[in-house]
Image (cartoon, rainbow, N blue to C red):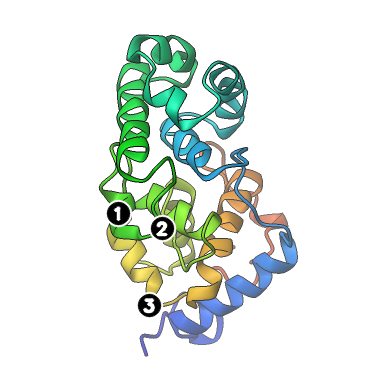
Amino acid sequence: MERESGWIGTMTKEEAALEVIVRLKEEYPDADCSLDYDEAWKLLVSVRLAAQCTDARVNVVVQELYKKYPDVNALAGAKEEDIEAIVRPCGLGRSKARDICACMRVLRDEYEGAVPETFEALLKLPGVGRKSANLIMGDVFGKPAIVTDTHCIRLVNRMGLVDGVKDPKKVEMALWKLIPPEEGNSFCHRLVMHGRAVCTARTKPFCNRCCLNGICPQIGV
């Protein structure tokens, strides 16, 4: 096993990952997706809108969207420019509207309005990448998943679980080797919560109140 000298007691990365999981569980016992949804297709829509936009803003914008287009068939039949007008506050309105309409048409025409349950099928949907597919697999279908969003990538690099790796797929592959499959989805949600509250991006991290104090190699540096 690879040993990481930055961790207290020169733990292996596997040992360090398990300790991080334990501490984050204690700090954030209720880990869940911060995007609001009550149907799988709505999470597909919201996660596309969330690109370069806050989840909080997405949760507001989709209220108007779903009021006007309450199901897959309605969105699949909508005009892209009408969708764009609603989702414009999320940024990248044109491309997001295009992907949402195209994705809903595939669900309507090929899956009878349902969201496919395999990772490979999800990746074939317009506008769906590995991050989105993992989120659907984990949150909707309860399958092992690792969602490498910006919080995840930033934090696991700071923690030393990966070493200077910024490519989302490479980070995902590295974490699959360290994180037990049943923990992956919740672990990533907890990283988001920790990244927003403590290990922040736009300010200096609040290491003095971090639950990883004493083991994270960045604390005290």
SS type, badge 3: loop
Between the C-alphas of marks 2 and 3, the distance is 23 Å
Label 3 or label 1, whichever lies nearer to me, is 1
Question: Which quarter of the rendering shows the N terminus?
Answer: bottom left
Between the C-alphas of marks 3 and 1, the distance is 24 Å
Residue 118, picture quadrant: bottom left
Between the C-alphas of marks 1 and 2, the distance is 7 Å
Compare residues 22 and 77 and report the one nearer the observer.
77
Q: Is residue 181 shown to the viewer in this render?
A: yes
Q: Position of residue 99 (x, y in %)?
A: 31, 29
What residue is disc 2 on? Answer: 117
Is 193 located above or below residue 38 in the figure?
below
Compare residues 124 and 192 and report the one nearer the observer.
124
Marks 3 and 1, the one that precedes in the sequence? 1
Furthest-bottom residue in this view:
1
Label 2 or label 3, whichever lies nearer to me, is 2
> Along the horizontal axis of the image, is 22 left or right of 62?
right
What residue is disc 3 on? Answer: 177
What residue is disc 1 on? Answer: 121
Question: At 54% across and 86% down in the image, what residue appears?
Answer: 9
Kind of residue sitting beneath label 1: Ala
Q: How many marks?
A: 3
Kind of residue sitting beneath label 2: Glu
Q: Position of residue 211 (x, y in %)?
A: 69, 64
> Badges 3 and 1: C-beta atoms under 8 Å apart?
no
Q: Position of residue 50 (x, y in %)?
A: 47, 33
Question: At 61% across and 44% down in the image, what residue appears?
Answer: 196
Residue 44, picture quadrant: top left
Q: Position of residue 7 (x, y in %)?
A: 51, 77
